[in-house]
Image (cartoon, rainbow, N blue to C red):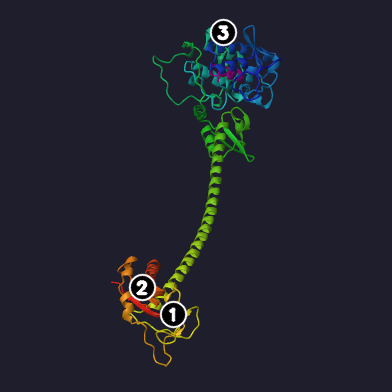
Amino acid sequence: MSAQRIGTPLPVGSTIIPGTLRARLEELRAKGQVLLLQEAVGVAVPLCLAAADRHAAGHVLYLHPSAIRERNGRWCIDAELAALPPTLPRDRSCLAPEERAGQPGTARSSVFSIAAILYELVTAQTVGPGMRRPTEIDPSLPPSIEAVMSKALVADPAHRPDDLLALAQALHHLAPAGVSAPPPADESHLDHVGEVDVDVSMSLMPPPPARRIEVQGGAMSPFEMIVKQRAPQQRPPDDQTAELSALKARLESDPRPRYVVIKDGMDHGPFNAVELLQQIASNSFLESDYLRDTLSAQERMIKDWDEFAPFAEHARIHRDIKAEKAAIERVVVQESRSTTGKALIGVAIVGALIAVGVVWLVAQRGVRRDKVDMGGEAVANVDTDGGLAVGAGRGGGSRWRGGGSVGGGNYPQLGGGMSCEAAQAKYVESYDLGPDGRKMPADLTAGAYGAVLNRGTYLNACGVPSSMSVSICAAVQNGRAVGVSVSTSPSNPRIANCIAGQIRAISFPSHPRLDVTRTTFAAN
């Protein structure tokens, strides 16, 4: 027998046998359509009769849509396919709970299977956790269809009816025009199994909503209701968020505690759907834990349940996100600590460099200050001194001029550009005593030099402010300053150098001997 793939929303790798009722259902589902009630009843009633004949002959079978073929316009049970357990998830949902252990079912099992097939025919959904009542999916369906299905879908076979002819009679009453009437049967057999009552509280059909329904004009017999024919309706595109929300609502609409979770070798529960979803959301139960539905007798890992796997997946994603955030926070803290340490090291290095620079700058300023102070100490004389005759005593780099007596003897001749103190040091003639031991008079008087230096006109050329004190020492020979030292208070090397240059350019009274004069200009 050949098989082909049909482009329908089935698990990856699933195959559908063409010509079967399953293939027809998937074609309708792909189009967003379902069978009309008359068409669905026209499928279900003949199946009841065919299954009753086979079971009466002593046969057992797996009754599901992939085991049903269309022959001569009628849906019939394929004996070869019905002998094998189904592989498609939607086919497995049509099996009675007792068949899930791997044994084909009796007439009691087929009652469950035909009701499950009818439910899928009119709703395009499957029987199981989260299923909705048919009239909730399609309000045009008669309420009596739920009464019949509730009895046939009882999970416990001991409380489920086993009369397929009674089921056929009840289904025929839902749409009398849909198919020829089955043989007469006692429909009360759907309410009792011998002396045992059928317990609809154990049905996979969810309980009706807790509301009171009033019908104007009194109660209406379900058999008197007119079956509303409806054209196939196009279903809206799938919306994952809306579907998940709808699935949650369907699961929570059944308040029965029917779910048991096997975790660490222990049973936990039973829980109703609300409690189970809360446990999954809080990560108490994981995808790898086993879940058992006590009504349908199905047991498999949570990740393998179509109804609960999406919620377990969301919980896992949320766990992964939290773990990723925690890992990122740890990395950020570590990086922050590392960055702080590096910053401290960098600050320390920069601080050390700044400290070295400050020390160098202070040292350099100290050197300059020392030079200025030294010059200041050499010329710190307020009054104008007279010229001094410098006597012989030390050799130097001076050149000598002929002459032997005071005023005309041999005197060392100095070059220019020196400081006042350096000029005194180079001048080696003794200026203290003459040849006869008497004190030598000055070559020129203080007034002669003061007349030149005390004018202060050269200060204006250097922009000396009135708040600055200036001390000058000038060593003069042959009418020019061969050595000049200038200090200012406050210190200003630029102005001091300018003043020294001005003094070197001044013409003084000429005499071959070296005379030194000191002048101070006090600040105003």
Residue type at mark 3 is Val
Question: Any magenta on residue 461?
Answer: no
* Circle nearer the viewer, 2 or 3: 2
- Say if mark 3 contacts mark 1, CB within 8 Å: no
Q: Is residue 91 left or right of residue 336?
A: right
Q: Residues within 10 Å of mark 2 (few under 14, many from 20)?
A: few
Residue drawn 55% across and 51% down? 334
Mark 1 lies on residue = 424
Q: CA distance from mark 1 to mark 2?
A: 19 Å
* Circle nearer the viewer, 1 or 2: 2
Q: x, y (%) of residue 394?
A: 49, 84
Question: Any magenta on residue 115?
Answer: yes
Q: x, y (%) of residue 356?
A: 50, 65
Q: Which quadrant is the N terminus positioned in?
A: top right
Q: Which residues are magenta?
A: 112-124
Mark 3 lies on residue = 179
Mark 2 lies on residue = 507
**Marks 1 and 2, the one that precedes in the sequence:** 1
Q: Is residue 444 visible?
A: yes
**Marks 2 and 3, the one that precedes in the sequence:** 3
